[in-house]
Image (cartoon, rainbow, N blue to C red):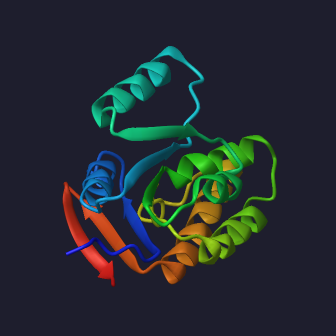
Amino acid sequence: MAPDRSRRVTFVLGGARSGKSAFAERLARGDGRELHYIATGQAFDDEMRARIARHREDRGEAWITHEVTTDLAGKLAEIDAPDRVILVDCLTLWVTNLMLEERAVDGEGRAFVSSLSDLSAHLIFVSNEVGLGIVPENKMARDFRDHAGRLHQALAAAADEVYFIAAGLPLKMKG
């Protein structure tokens, strides 16, 4: 039986070190399509450079990697094809990048989510759940939490499947 080539949006959400990226990568590899990975992290120090290199090595050569800091919708449109699965890891780093560049985060988030209906690949998005902790003490951290929370709500509404990952275990919330 041929794999399903219809567009699908999967959203994988969880805490730091919850296993969400590994779960998302397993979903992508099991799809049977060409594997594309959009990495949104920026290497501002040696530790982050080493982390990025380790993640790239762990994924292996099956993945085509694209590094994107802000123009996520543009890159998705550029590499979109029905024979591809595109995994984006992670949206909270993307929100951080937008904030660092003093961009209109909520507007760009709405435009990004709206653009998904024009795409044909299986799209898998990974993000950190930021709403389960205490209210941050400073405005920038509260703004980050609010931007990420609004983006997560919009993406979850648009997604076909939503998973929450805790301790490496997936909980299917939608789909």
Point out residue 62 in the picture as x, y percentages from the top left corner. 33, 39
Q: Which of 8 and 101 is in front in this view?
A: 8
How many numbered markers are drawn? 0
Vertical placement of 168 versus 50: above or below? Answer: below
Quadrant in the picture for the C terminus: bottom left
Q: Residue lying furthest top in this view? A: 46
Vertical placement of 97 versus 47: above or below? Answer: below
Relative horizontal placement of residue 158, taking residue 69 as reference (left or right): left
Q: Nearer the viewer, residue 142 or 165?
A: 165
- Residue 59: image quadrant is top left
Quadrant in the picture for the N terminus: bottom left
- Residue 124: image quadrant is bottom left
Point out residue 91 in the picture as x, y percentages from the top left corner. 54, 54
Q: Residue at x 27, y 53 (%)?
A: 29
Point out residue 171 in the picture as x, y percentages from the top left corner. 24, 72
Point out residue 167 in the picture as x, y percentages from the top left corner. 19, 55
Tell me, yes or no, if residue 126 can be seen here.
no
Q: Which residue is drawn at 42% across and 19% down?
A: 50
Tell me, yes or no, if residue 59 can be seen here.
yes
Q: Which residue is drawn at 39% across and 52% down?
A: 34
Q: Nearer the viewer, residue 135 or 17?
A: 17
Vertical placement of 21 versus 13: above or below? Answer: above
